[in-house]
Image (tube, rainbow, N blue to C red):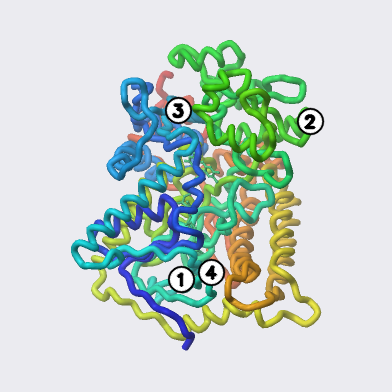
């Protein structure tokens, strides 16, 4: 039997970003003993890096906003591929979750009359993003952590132990989920610092591990985002959906090379910033797709008037959904109208006074000054697309966040469905809170419903997990030894070049061949040294997940022969209404992945009624439209 420490809980939450913390709070409030496990420091998650804000239709800045408008915008942004029940719950519950954060101690920026201020963002019809300057994620994490501490104080008063009901295990990476038959029995992992193994026994696990961006070369994501939760779910028998949809944020830094990919928040455009090419042309007017023509201004005068009079003017095209803007920038650069370092210009300096830029965008001002020696109050930024977010993830039941594996739940970026083929900015932070809470409640209810609350952990499964974890110290095939860094670099290049922002069938096929080769090379990875803080070993373990998840992305991208949202096929440039009715479902098969189509559940009639017939006609098949009465629009 492997030597390890063991901890038993009712619910283990893997991930301490917004989704994980909100799930942990909920499960603890419902009386469960909860562990939160995170591979980085507590408080260091993507959520803390979120800049622009949380989308919630509070209607504080424009009283026309309400959940129905937010629902419509979310479905349009996702090109109607979203799980509509998730989009409905999200739009209805986001305002309550924002209010609730203030009861935990958050303090959002205010309107002049003291209400929570809301800013414009791409794809949102009204100003909708509650924010704290451009450091909203920091406030979100700070207040969720504060709530956790206050719950721990209550537990101390009652039991004498702060951690009796809610404990954080930081810098601890989970490498395997454990099953008792077909249901969850726990999780296996290791302490990053000591390399020692650790076992969590629990009937319910909530995955809240975030995204997959580290499989791509140019990315806004940090080192933790290696698709661990996606891979853990697959291996435990759950399915993933929408994996072909990866969001390339239009504006990442492009210069200097050491910071390429770091995010430039969409708030720059929301607050008036414009995109120009090397000819000085504000080019987004040339890229308004037909489906959005009635909502976006086709001339500069109207676009500029919109900032002060939204009732009588259409929105500037810089605020189109992210997939549209990213493709437009890509086309300008390809056509030879890019900036000196291969991006385009994003200018806010000629649009707002310097003091206003520093007040509204303090992090961006600091980021460009420190990293690129550019003063954004005086000169434009150079920006280009960067891999940012994965729309695909664990297929869950919308109301409870339950996966198909009993006892396994997923929320936040690791869950799929909510955002369809493209996420709107600001809709992730609200997603984390809405579905984090639902996952915590779902896990607690699941545990309550169990007759036997202590599923058995098999010794042989634990031994196998530990053997797999240390295999890389033992040496691969003689003469073929690989190091994890070169395999990772090649994987990132492959995904960037062949399964990136613009895809072609032949190139994706090439990527799949390369992924097979990389899988083979990964079997020969050898890591020097021992288990005490050994980054090479950590990467070798993460690579297993990145390769599996990359295979999901590539296989689904090859099958989906249309362009929709974050998935652009140059060889299939249009949206195909038949494909809107299909989800691609990934399941584990041997050490690889099978991808099969599955029908979407048709939109509920009352939700369908929120759209004009003419709009639905742009997305739906003639067969589907036949059942919808054509309304005058
Ligand atoms: P994360 O916050 O990503 O947290 C994941 C957690 O899982 C971490 O604690 C990590 O350590 C842990 N973990 C991962 N793997 C393991 C493992 N194997 N074992 C143990 N722990 C593990 N969205 C918005 O809505 N508005 C914005 O303004 C915005 N700005 C953004 C800016 C940047 C720079 C970035 C990168 C993203 C931004 N996003 C924004 C997106 C949003 O921040 C993320 O989608 C969201 O925070 C994901 O939250 P999460 O709770 O799902 O996971």
Circle nearer the N terminus (1, 4): 1
Is disc 2 placed on a helix, strand or loop? loop
Q: Which is more toward the observer, 513 or 309? A: 309
Q: Residue at x 34, y 57 (%)?
A: 24
Q: Which residue is mark 2?
A: 335
Is disc 3 placed on a helix, strand or loop? strand
Q: Which is more toward the observer, 167 or 591? A: 167
Camera sees residue 602 = no
For the residues carrying marks 2 and 4, which lies nearer the camera in this image?
A: 4
Distance, label 3 to label 4, CA atoms, is: 40 Å
Residue 119, disc: 3
Kindly tell me whether mark 2's CB lies below 8 Å from ligand 1: no
Distance, label 2 to label 1, CA atoms, is: 48 Å
Residue 260, relative to residue 64: is it above or below? below
Circle nearer the N terminus (2, 1): 1
Residues tagged 2 and 1 counted as in contact (Cβ below 8 A): no
Q: Residue at x 34, y 70 (%)?
A: 203
Distance, label 2 to label 3, CA atoms, is: 33 Å
| Crowd class of label 2 (few under 14; some 14 to 19; many from 20; radius 10 Å) | few
Q: Residue at x 37, y 21 (%)?
A: 62
Circle nearer the N terminus (1, 3): 3
| Crowd class of label 1 (few under 14; some 14 to 19; many from 20; radius 10 Å) | many
Q: Residue at x 42, y 83 (%)?
A: 458
Is disc 1 placed on a helix, strand or loop? strand
Q: Which residue is mark 4?
A: 192
Residue 177, disc: 1
């Amino acid at each position: 039997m492997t030597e390890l420490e063991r901890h038993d809980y009712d619910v283990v939450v893997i991930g301490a970003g917004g989704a994980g913390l909100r799930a942990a709070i909920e499960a603890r409030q419902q009386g469960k003993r909860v562990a939160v496990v995170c591979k980085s420091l507590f408080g260091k998650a993507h959520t803390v890096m979120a800049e622009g804000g949380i989308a919630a239709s509070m209607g504080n800045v424009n009283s026309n906003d309400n959940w129905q408008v937010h629902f419509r915008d979310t479905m349009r942004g996702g090109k109607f591929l979203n799980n509509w029940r998730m989009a409905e719950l999200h739009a209805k519950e986001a305002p309550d979750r924002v209010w609730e954060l203030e009861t935990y101690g958050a303090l959002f920026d205010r309107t002049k009359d003291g209400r929570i201020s809301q800013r414009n963002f791409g794809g949102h019809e009204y100003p909708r993003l509650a924010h704290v300057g451009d450091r909203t994620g920091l406030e979100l994490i700070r207040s969720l952590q504060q709530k956790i501490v206050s719950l721990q104080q209550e537990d101390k008063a009652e039991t004498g132990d702060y951690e009796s009901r809610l404990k954080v295990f930081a810098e601890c990476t989970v490498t395997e989920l454990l099953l008792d038959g077909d249901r969850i029995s726990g999780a296996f992992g290791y302490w990053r610092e000591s390399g020692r193994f650790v076992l969590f026994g629990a009937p319910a696990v909530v995955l809240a591990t975030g995204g997959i961006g580290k499989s791509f070369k140019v990315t806004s994501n940090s080192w933790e985002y290696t698709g661990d939760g996606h891979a853990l779910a697959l291996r435990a028998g759950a399915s993933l959906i929408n994996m072909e949809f990866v969001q390339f944020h239009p504006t990442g830094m492009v210069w200097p090379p050491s910071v390429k990919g770091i995010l430039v928040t969409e708030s720059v455009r929301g607050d008036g910033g414009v995109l120009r090419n090397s000819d000085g042309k504000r080019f987004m007017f040339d890229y308004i797709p037909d489906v959005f023509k009635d909502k976006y201004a086709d001339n500069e005068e109207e676009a500029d008037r919109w900032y002060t009079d939204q009732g009588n003017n259409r929105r500037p095209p810089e605020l189109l959904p992210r997939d549209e803007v990213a493709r437009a920038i890509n086309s300008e650069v390809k056509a030879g109208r890019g900036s000196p370092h291969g991006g385009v210009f994003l200018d806010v300096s000629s649009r707002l006074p310097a003091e206003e830029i520093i007040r509204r965008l303090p992090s961006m001002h600091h980021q460009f000054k420190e990293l690129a020696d550019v003063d954004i109050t005086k000169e434009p930024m150079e920006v280009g697309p960067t891999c940012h977010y994965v729309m695909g993830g664990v297929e869950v039941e919308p109301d409870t966040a339950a996966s198909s594996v009993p006892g396994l739940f997923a929320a936040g970026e690791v869950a799929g469905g909510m955002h369809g083929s493209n996420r709107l900015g600001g809709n992730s932070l609200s997603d984390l809170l809405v579905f984090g809470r639902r996952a915590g409640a779902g896990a607690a209810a699941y545990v309550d419903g169990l007759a036997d609350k202590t599923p058995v952990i098999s010794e042989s499964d634990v031994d196998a997990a530990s053997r797999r974890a240390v295999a890389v110290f033992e040496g691969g095939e003689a003469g073929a030894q690989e190091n994890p860094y070169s395999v990772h670099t090649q994987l990132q290049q492959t995904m960037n070049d062949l399964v990136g922002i613009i895809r072609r069938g032949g190139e994706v096929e090439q990527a799949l061949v390369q992924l097979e080769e990389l899988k083979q090379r990964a079997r020969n990875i050898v890591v020097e040294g021992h288990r005490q803080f050994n980054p090479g070993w950590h990467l070798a373990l993460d690579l297993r997940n990145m390769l599996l998840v990359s295979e999901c992305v590539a296989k689904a991208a090859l099958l989906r022969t249309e362009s929709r949202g974050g998935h652009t096929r140059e060889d299939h440039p249009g949206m195909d209404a038949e494909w809107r009715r299909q989800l691609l479902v990934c399941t584990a098969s041997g050490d690889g992945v099978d991808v099969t189509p599955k029908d979407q559940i048709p939109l509920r009639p009352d939700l369908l009624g929120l759209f004009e017939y003419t709009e639905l006609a742009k997305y739906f098949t003639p067969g589907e439209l036949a059942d919808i009465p054509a309304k005058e629009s």
